[in-house]
Amino acid sequence: MGEKKKVIRLIDLGEVPPVRSQTCYHAVGYAFGPETPNTIILVSPKTPYVCVGFHQEVEREVDLDYCRQAGLPVYRREVGGGAVYLDRHQLFVQWIFNPESLPQSLEEKFKFYVEPMIRTYRAIGVEASFRPINDIHVSGKKIGGTGAARIGQAEVLVGSFMFDFDKKTMARVLRVASEKMRDKVFQSLEQYMTTMKELLGEAPERERVKEIYLQQVSELLGAEVREGGMNEAELAEAERLDQLFQSPDWIFQKGPLRPPAVKIHEDVHVQEIDYKAPGGLIRLTARTRGQQLHSVWISGDFTAIPKEAVTDLEKALSGVTLDEKSVTEAVSRALQESGLYCPGVELAHWVSALLKIRENLPPQ
């Protein structure tokens, strides 16, 4: 007898309420067990919304007043990356897989995940290609990014097919320092981002794109794609998460923003610093006592760093003296113990970011 063909469960949810378009893959991840098949969810939100990455501070990234006026809900996902405007013109492609069925390195995971998307784009006349670390590009313009996370026992990879994109609203929902900067954001989106509608003149039929994509998945993964649905446990988890993801405690969980370089008393200061690493922005909110890092809160738009690993790093840095040797040793030990790894955010970048805190302290 030949080897039994692998089966991938397809859950095609069509259009759903905006919060469910995020909670569905989280729910399958949290309910994932030894008998759960590798699962692909295809879904779009019925109405628009804004979604921020897990490590971001909502008040810092999103113009909440505008979102309220425009009726745009704001949710936080458990996957890294930046704030983004989402609507029905994107088809989300969510993989919830057994970790053993994916490549080990993060770069290879992303490459593996986007390959059937790239082949689908090419089949409809869009010359897409993979651009490390985790983007899909067409002639130097981005047509899609991806994110990754470990949710429960599952490895999760997410991205989308870009049928169309409202760049003007995307530029509007972000919190920026000035309207001049907002204009620059919009110009940059126009210059460096594209969609199927722009490239082909009109958006292709969604069912055709799905059909081609699922055929590519079947061929590349050597698996039968079998349509199914969410089971009772997954649905119950999704309903729980629908409530959680809409709760202020979850959305604003990083707490109120702290102004930079605030003197609490002679020895205690609170400050915020930004450090741009190749793999994303590191934002540190730090409380120092003398030359010692009393505590630090880490946020940013880096991709695919589990929240537990960030928490472990925050704990490991508590009490560290802000000299290069002490910081390097503490970060190195924490990275090794947690297994924290993000392409483009290396040991040296964490150290450089942390030493920027020392630069703003008064001399001892």
Image (tube, rainbow, N blue to C red):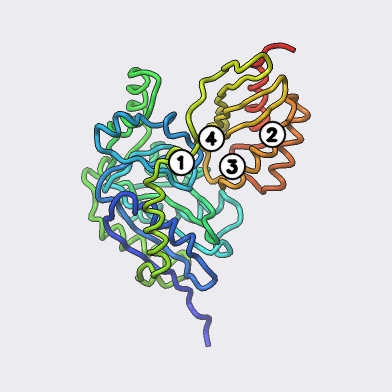
Q: Along the line of sight, which residue is nearer the eye, 9 or 163?
A: 9
Residue 190 in view: no
Q: Nearer the viewer, mark 4 or mark 2?
A: 2
Query: Measured along the vertical axis of the image, is residue 34 above or below residue 105?
Result: below
Q: Tell me which numbered mark, 4 or 3, is placed earlier along the sequence.
A: 4
Q: Along the line of sight, which residue is nearer the eye, 353 or 190?
A: 353
Amino acid on which the number 2 mark rests in the picture:
Ser
Q: Residue at x 36, y 26 (%)?
A: 185
Q: Tell me which numbered mark, 1 or 2, is placed earlier along the sequence.
A: 1
User: What distance separates the C-alpha of mark 1 from that of mark 4?
Assistant: 9 Å
User: What distance separates the C-alpha of mark 1 from that of mark 2?
Assistant: 24 Å
Q: Tell me which numbered mark, 1 or 4, is placed earlier along the sequence.
A: 1
Amino acid on which the number 1 mark rests in the picture:
Gly
In the image, which disc is placed on residue 299? 4
Amino acid on which the number 4 mark rests in the picture:
Ser
The crowd level at tag 3 (other Cα within 10 Å; few <14, some 14-19, many 20+) is some
Identify the secondary structure beneath mark 2: loop
Q: Residue at x 64, y 45 (%)?
A: 340
- The image quadrant of residue 212 is bottom left
- Percent of width and height locating residue 310: 60, 42
The crowd level at tag 1 (other Cα within 10 Å; few <14, some 14-19, many 20+) is many
Query: Measured along the vertical axis of the image, is residue 10 above or below residue 109?
Result: below
User: What distance separates the C-alpha of mark 4 from that of mark 2?
Assistant: 16 Å
User: What distance separates the C-alpha of mark 3 from that of mark 1?
Assistant: 17 Å
Is the residue under label 3 in contact with that under label 4 (CB below 8 Å)?
Answer: no
Q: Along the line of sight, which residue is nearer the eye, 138 or 255?
A: 255
The residue carrying mark 1 is: 53
The crowd level at tag 4 (other Cα within 10 Å; few <14, some 14-19, many 20+) is many
Is the residue under label 4 in contact with that under label 1 (CB below 8 Å)?
Answer: no
The residue carrying mark 2 is: 318
The residue carrying mark 3 is: 343
